[in-house]
Amino acid sequence: MLTTLFEPATIAVIGASADPAKVGHSVLNNLIIHKYGGRICPVNPSASQILGLKSYKSVSEIEGGIDCAVIVIPAKHVPSVLAEAADCSAKAAIVISAGFKEAGREGLLLEDELKRISKEKGISIVGPNCLGIINTANSMNATFAAGMLPKGRIAFFSQSGALGIAILDWAIGNKIGFSKFISLGNKAHLNEVDFMEYLVNDPETDVILGYIEDVVDGRAFLEAAKKATRKKPVIILKSGGTEAGARAASSHTGALAGSETAFRAAFRQAGIIKAEGIQDLFDTALAFAGGRLPDGNRLLVITNAGGPGIIAADASEKLGVSLPQMTKESISAIQNKLPPNASIYNPVDIIGDATSGRYSVVIETAVNDPNVDALLVILTPQAMTDVENTADIVIKNASSTTKPVIACFMGEERVRSSINRMKEHRIPNFSYPEVAVKEFKVLSDYSRWRNSARDENTFSCGNKDAVSDLIEKALSEGRYQLGEDMAMEILSHYGFSFPERGLAKTAMDAAIIAERIGFPVVMKIASPDILHKTDVGGIKLNISTPAAAEDAFLEITSNVQRFMPDAFINGVMMYEMIKGGKEVILGVTYDRTFNHMLMFGLGGIYVEVLKDVSFRIAPVSRHEAEAMISEIRTSALLRGARGEKPADIDAVVESIIKLSCLVTDFPIIHELDINPLMVMHKGAFALDARTILEPEKDSKGF
């Protein structure tokens, strides 16, 4: 059906108009003046001819039916006209008309009617409340925007019509070619997932750009993006990342998570390149328009000015871009052809009086150097600089290599024509060195992502029946916040280990159990009503004698009775005191778009103060679990610092995977914290946990 949308043999413009002030005139005129090759049928009950074309009073009058309807009439008439178009063989419709869910309750009901018609009659809908679509391959401009995109290899979908118009104008002004343009509008039927799935197989498209404000189906989006990014770069600008009101969260994970966090995690997991703003979206699109990816992150910088070269070097170090020296053979080849005061290393500074010949010597050598994955050619237009010939040299050498060649011709008036010529040969130019380095880093990161091996999320690591029974029991008792005891029991069925423990009902029990476990011990109040034990004096650490255990039992129970007199007390849990490990925190929170989101970080101040954590959407693969650990700034502490034994990283990876399995099997789990997970040199122990269930889901997790 999307093929019909982009390649219709017959288009009906319903609401076509001879009045230049009307949207229906702009849409029809765009199809005509840009020489769309198919049949164009204006539909207007008040006209017999519009812009030289025969006009029809209704769609049903069009001989042979239609493939696609572009609808630009008042919202209240759209449902009946859409149904009529479907009855006349239309398989796709572009509803430009506004006045639907964005206009209030009546508009929402009208939009629901469009959804019903789409489903019943099998007609795909773009919009409503959209700008339209463009396919440059067949010169189809079914929008009311001014101008036509140049032909190229970039496709763009946008939830904002106004931003879409800005992108169109930018592309025209910068001579950047596009293959497709799609204005999503209200996304009553077709959305970003449908277009990603189409564009990844579109032979006219090499790069996919998008602007979104929300996602209709987070899971479908994630799966479609994972498939797409394996074949083509997907660059998306997401707005609306801040939440108007902070939701209440009773876990560390919930407090640290949010809509923007979830989208960043999903983008990282799917290999989507997240644009940080409109300019970044433009710059990244420009970088990929070159059509080449580096084999690694080794960049050679060539410059005729020391300052810009230093800026490029600084940016490279900050971003982790490697600035290698060329081979000895390459250095020998250029050394005698450059002035004695030139720098022959990296950046290669051919100094201010550089001719195009000097650029040629270095560039021709560098494109063949095995130590170099890409070139950044910086030029400042000094009095003796031969700008045009240098651009020709860049173009010539770029065409002879598969390595990315990025230009940074700085300035405006003297470099403008050279920049335009390089764009015609798909050589990206950036105005500033730091931007050029950043965009090379994006190319390098994407290349690594696309070429990296991936394991599948095919884990089965828990006793579902046992956990289902526990959750059923909690729900039958009206409990949705599960304390440490039940949370630990649930986690134990998914392979988590805990210190040796026992429940003391009396002070004497406490002394006996402590001796059995072995001193020192930790003592915690056992109550389904108390999640935050420290707040009520419900924890005692480092208990080292039987008498101290008896005293601690009495003190803990009296503290709780004083602070929470109505709390039900099971007793006091006695735990083996684990020492010598590294504290980490694992958590889960529920995101309304992507469902469960996992969190990992070091415990203590690292999560409380520094918020040094990483996130992923469940389920995760082993590769993604490993990436979560390496992403945090303090991950080196787990690997051993200053002679300390390294923590068992594999045990943490396994713990993340087990937690992912648990919440995937049981969506009823809304939030969960394991804080801390004590990671030893071998193995890991969960020392505390709590869980919150979502009452709207049943215990089977469906």
Image (cartoon, grey):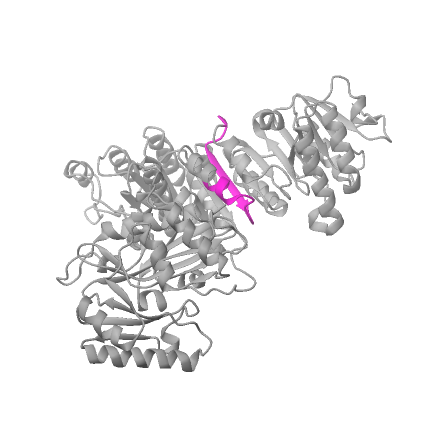
Give above or below for 24 relative to 535.
Answer: above
49 over 701 or under it: above or below: above
Horizontal side of residue 286 vs 183, given as left or right:
left
Q: Is residue 217 magenta?
A: yes
Quarter holding the N terminus is top right
- Near-viewer residue (425 or 697): 697
Q: Point out residue 672 in the picture as x, y percentages from the top left corner.
A: 40, 58
692 sits left or right of 32 in the view: left
Q: Which of 189 and 473 lies nearest the eye of the viewer? A: 473
Q: Is residue 259 left or right of residue 144?
A: left
Residue at the extreme right: 46
**Front-most of 670 and 231?**
670
Residue 31 position in % (x across, y down)? 68, 29
Picture quadrant of residue 636: bottom left
Reply yes or no: does residue 680 show up in magenta.
no
- Residue 379 visible? The answer is no
From this view, report whether residue 362 is shown above or below residue 3.
below
Looking at the image, which is closer to me, 60 or 282?
60
Q: Is residue 267 left or right of residue 303?
A: right
How many numbered circles does the render carry? 0
Chain part drawn in magenta: 202-222
Q: Quadrant of residue 508?
A: bottom left
Q: Residue at x 87, y 31 (%)?
A: 46
Q: Residue furthest left?
A: 643
Residue 511 drawn at (x, y percent): 22, 75
Quick check: can you spot residue 110? yes
**Residue 470 in picture, x, y percent from top left:** 41, 54
**Residue 550 sits in quarter:** bottom left
